[in-house]
Amino acid sequence: MVARAGQAALVTGASSGIGRATAVLLAERGWYVFAGVRRDSDAELMGDLLGDYGQPVLLDVTDPRSLLEAEVVVRGSGGLDALVNNAGIAVAAPLEYLPLADFRRQLEVNLTGQLAATQTFLPHLRSSGGRIVFVGSISGRVANPLLGPYVASKFALAGLADTLRTELAPSGVAVSLLEPGPIATDIWRRSREVGLALARRLPVDARRRYGTMIEAFEQLAGSVEARALPPRSVATIVHRALTAVHPKPRYLIGREAWVGAAFAMLPARLRARIMEFQVRGHGVRPRLSAVRPEDGGEGVPPSDLRAVRP
């Protein structure tokens, strides 16, 4: 048995970005952290970062055997008080030409894998009266073109988290969904690399039909990425969701997330027109007036939403 003090949390997808920042922050604040990673090299790095306040665990949320082996490690060290479902990938391509194998992979990692991890570790959380945090995205409210697979996974994850929250309420296991805006992580660099590789395989018709949209989207993505928040900003809210006396159902993180939530409340026809203008490269900046954050939101709403790109 691993000697440890305090509460224990498992963080999936802890090799980089939000997952790594969360694992390190929780360890700094006295938690014992199981850092789920897929590669031995990442396990070595996380072991150095966590020191006596945690340990790496080889874990692939899409592999049932890997999940069971990780559960044995957790059980042998005394159980679990929190599960942070963070593992995720981003697949980018026009849906018309998206290989279905790539779509299935997107859902397997971002949705099915989250449920699989939850099912595996839920007995520990029931025993401890623990908590579950899902790292979603504002893309679970706003559908961006060319990110259809990722958007679909995050919309579905929001529904999964909301349903699970209701189902687990009688058992005392709280469930929170984080909805960050753009975060400066490697997921988007890797997504662009995969997207470029996929684009090379697209037929001529696809490049003709979506070329302008892709160029406009790349320009927009560049401007948004420049305003991306550091991963630790999300890690801080993870800690808040795990330690608050009454954790909130949903936490909006960052200005872009608040703007996205406001945009999602506009009439569907207006949202569609704005998005159509943007992907054609017109750079529309909609005027968004009185915005009411969703009940349970987190963070400081922007002071002026009248000239903000959603």
Image (cartoon, rainbow, N blue to C red):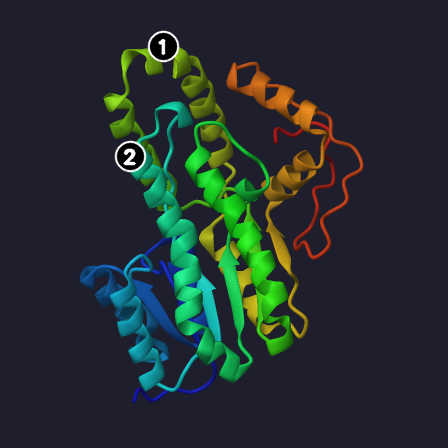
Regarding mark 2 in the picture, which secondary structure is present there?
helix
Which quadrant, please, contains the N terminus? bottom left
Q: Residue furthest right?
A: 290
Q: Residue at x 60, y 77 (%)?
A: 171
Of residues 28 and 96, which is closer to you in this image?
96
**Tag nearer the camera, 2 or 1:** 1
Residue type at mark 1: give it. Answer: Arg
- Counting from the top left corner in percent of width and height, residue 157 is at 51, 51
- Counting from the top left corner in percent of width and height, residue 266 is at 72, 32
Q: Residue at x 52, y 38 (%)?
A: 227
Tell whether 304 sits left or right of 243. right
Q: Which residue is mark 2?
A: 194
Q: Which residue is mark 1?
A: 208
Above or below, comparing residue 126 to residue 37 in the picture = below
Residue 86 in sight in this render: no
- Counting from the top left corner in percent of width and height, residue 63 is at 28, 60
Tell whether 139 sits left or right of 58. right
